[in-house]
Amino acid sequence: MNSKRMDIGSKDVISSLPDALICHILSFLSTKDAALTSVLSKRWRNLLAFVPILDLDNTIYDHPKMGRRKRLQMRTSFKVFVDRVMALQGNAPLNKFSLRCKIGRDPSRVNGWILKVLERGVVDLSLYISSEYKYPLPPQVLMSKTLVTLKVAGTDEFTIDVMDVYLPKLKTLHMEDVSFDDETGASFAKLISACHALEELVMTKMMLDFWESCSVCNPTLKRVKIYAENIDENPKSVSFDTPNLVYLEFTDTVAAKYPKAKFDSLVEASVGIRMTPDQVFHARDLVNRHYGYTTKLVGNVADFLMGISNVKILYLSSEALE
Amino acid sequence: MSEKKIVLKSSDGKTIDVAKAVALQSQTITHMVEDSCVGNEIPFENVTGQVLAKVIEYCKKHVVVDGETLTCKTVAHVIHTRTIDEIRTFFNVENDYTPRKKQ
């Protein structure tokens, strides 16, 4: 039997591999690598048209060291490449679109791609956009009936203006270093509450310490991770109304108040609530205490801790303990 | 992309439609096709529908190259790390592009 296989030879094996299998293989490659295979043979030429995953990354080619002219050249050829791939794929349904790039003053070309993939019914959208100029997220992204996963990241010039939200299938939302047009926190709260199927929320490097309030209110949320790096500022108000939350990871400076900490289903929590260096200094101020000056404790963590008191597994950072 | 399809029939009467080339990734199925193909339908008297479905799932994610079974992900890694010529050798792909005529 084996010799019979060898007899057929690998040639037959490859030419008999169905296009679907080859497309599946190509879906594991970056779109650039996948496009390179089109030179293998005529048969491979247009297979990219049928790969339902686009993974586009220009940031590896965009180094200050390269010199301005070279960078602009690379950016232009990247745009041309993406335009070609988009044209090749036409209106074919798209599963995943991941874009990492730097943009200049005019985001219209990039926005064109985003709108096109939304039209094509993209399910998983990842946008990592770094820009020196203000870059507003196209509002159509918040109005997709097919999106299940949305990840946005950038420099804080990437802003989200929350107007109409219709994301009936969204289960996973990740935000990193993006800002909201409305800095009170109301836009954020509106976005979270409006996602009726949301299960996972991850927020890192967000400036929530500067909002009037950070309110996470959503009945379907199961996992939340919030990691705020800022050490000098205390958030004014942090609220959680997440009765179905099972897993919480929360690291931030202590808030002035925790109006709501509703966690009926919490199983595991990892809490790193810390004081600012100033607060630590005052809390440890033994000299004044000796003389009878009592320091006012800024922020009542007790409300928060009461809220998570029924948790089964709890990790506390050393700063939280202090 | 129309490809030849075959029908696999399980012991409990379930039928699965699958592209012939995908099914042939499995040696077992290949032998059955060679030995007892009745028209386009291949009976598997010892395999239930559930197991057959799993086998087909596996076939959709693996390729056989040079007698070795590899996952599609592994093959992708091969493509990622090799030059075009090396990939051609690995897959035994014939370059059927005609060279541009010099003008």
Image (cartoon, coloured by chain):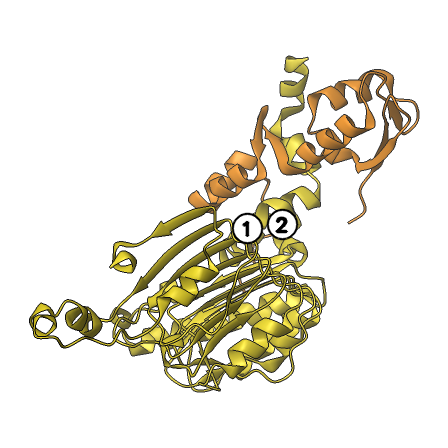
Chain colours: A yellow, B orange
Q: Residue at x 66, y 48 (%)?
A: A43
Q: Residue furthest front?
A: A292
Q: Chain of mark 2?
A: A
Query: For this view, does A38 lie left or right of residue B50?
Result: left
Image spot of residue A20 (x, y percent)? 70, 45
> Whole-Å distance between the Cαs marked 2 and 1?
7 Å
| Of pointers 2 and 1, the one earlier in the residue sequence | 1
Query: For this view, does A261 lie left or right of residue A17?
Result: left
The residue under label 1 is which amino acid type? Thr
Quadrant of residue A190 within the rendered picture: bottom right
Quadrant of residue A7 within the rendered picture: top right
Between residues A82 and A118, which one lies in front from this camera angle?
A118
Q: Which mark is residue A37?
A: 1
Image spot of residue B46 (x, y percent)? 82, 16
Q: Residue at x 50, y 70 (%)?
A: A260
Q: Chain of mark 1?
A: A
Q: Residue at x 59, y 69 (%)?
A: A84
Q: Relative to B11, say whether A98 is above or below.
A: below
Q: Which residue is mark 2?
A: A44
Between residues A86 and A241, which one lies in front from this camera angle?
A241
**Residue B26 visible in image:** yes
Q: Residues within 10 Å of mark 1 (few under 14, many from 20)?
A: many
Query: For this view, does A39 lie left or right of residue A256?
Result: right
Q: Quadrant of the C terminus of chain B?
A: bottom right
Image spot of residue B88 (x, y percent)? 53, 40
**Residue B92 visible in image:** no
Between residues A89 and A295, which one lies in front from this camera angle?
A295
Q: Relative to B29, say whether A36 is above or below.
A: below
Q: Relative to B101, say whether A205 is above or below.
A: below
Secondary structure of the residue carrying tag 2 is helix
The residue under label 2 is which amino acid type? Trp
